[in-house]
Amino acid sequence: MTPRTVMTIGAVALALVVGNGQSVDHWSGQDADRAAAAEPTASATRTADPVPTWRPVSADALRSVDAVQLRAESIVLSSDDHTVTTVSMRDAKHTVGVLDRILGTPARTQTAVGDAGRCVPASTTSTWGGALRVAALSEPGTAGNRVEIRVLRDHVRSRLGDVIELSGPDGVQVGDDVSEQIDDAPKSDRESLGSDDAQAWQLLLQRGWSDDHAVDGDGDHGGAADHERSTDRDRQADGAGSAGGARSSDGANGVSVLTDDSTVTVIGSPMPIRPARGC
């Protein structure tokens, strides 16, 4: 075999390897959506202000989503019980962008600091179908979150009209009776917000948001702490408000539910329970 023949065979083999790699990595519709991709890859080392990295999620994959689960620090989009993508709540652009691609154009409102009460930070709020609300904060919350999410119904319609189930940890949905979970929860994870005549609860379903961003009783992060630590209790009726606060010394942060009696009315994160300060 001559040297020229060896070089020719080597070039053909290299071309086949490159071609195979490209075909395996290509999804239908991926090229058009590559700029708007949104799946976080967990960092090996957690830092105080992590910067997520992302890989593309195809349009076909997003069209298959039939469930959205709110967790303490992320949302998980799934299809037939298989995870399609997980979106970090530390990234507002990708959280809102992915939901736009699945659910279509939301109703959007701009809120200045204190517009809806002294606890409310400046944000752009996107609401899909009156069921899912995401407030993209103009400044990161003290817990490290860049969005605040509220689930107000048990489902929402996709941009194609398909039903997408909405839930919190362990499949808890708006409208569920959580009396057993309330009874079984430690006192630190539940708080009565009602009265003898009208029972209501806040129940922490999943802890999240580390102490890296916690603010002590006298602390302040750039003057924003006082309006970023709402507990939602004053706005329970309509699920409105902001909860972007840090975990306090006598409370905990994460994803919580608000109830009317024992029926879930709102699922939200971050939504701290028993914070040291009301706001």
Image (cartoon, helix red, strand yellow):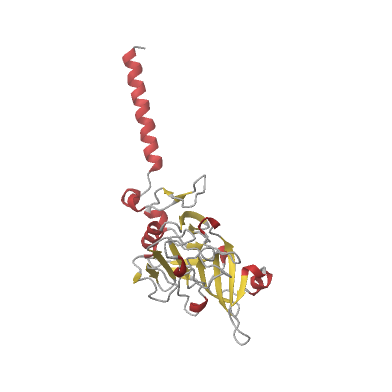
The residue at 39%/35% (across/down) is: 20
Q: Which of 88/235 is in front?
A: 235
The residue at 40%/76% (across/down) is: 116
Q: Pick out the residue farthest to the top.
A: 2
- In the image, taking residue 179 as reference, residue 236 lies left or right, namely left
Q: Is residue 139 visible?
A: yes
The residue at 37%/38% (across/down) is: 22
Q: Residue 84: where, in percent of width, then height?
A: 46, 54
Q: Pick out the residue farthest to the front.
A: 218
Q: Residue 67: where, in percent of width, then height?
A: 48, 62
Q: Which of 276/10 is in front?
A: 276
Quadrant of the image containing the N terminus: top left
Q: Residue 190: where, in percent of width, then height?
A: 62, 71
Q: Pick out the residue farthest to the bottom.
A: 197
Q: Which of 171/14 is in front?
A: 171
Q: Is residue 157 visible?
A: no
- In the image, taking residue 20 as reference, residue 86 lies left or right, namely right
Q: Residue 270: where, in percent of width, then height?
A: 50, 65
The answer to which image quadrant residue 60 occupies is: bottom left
Count of labels in the image: 0
The residue at 45%/51% (across/down) is: 40
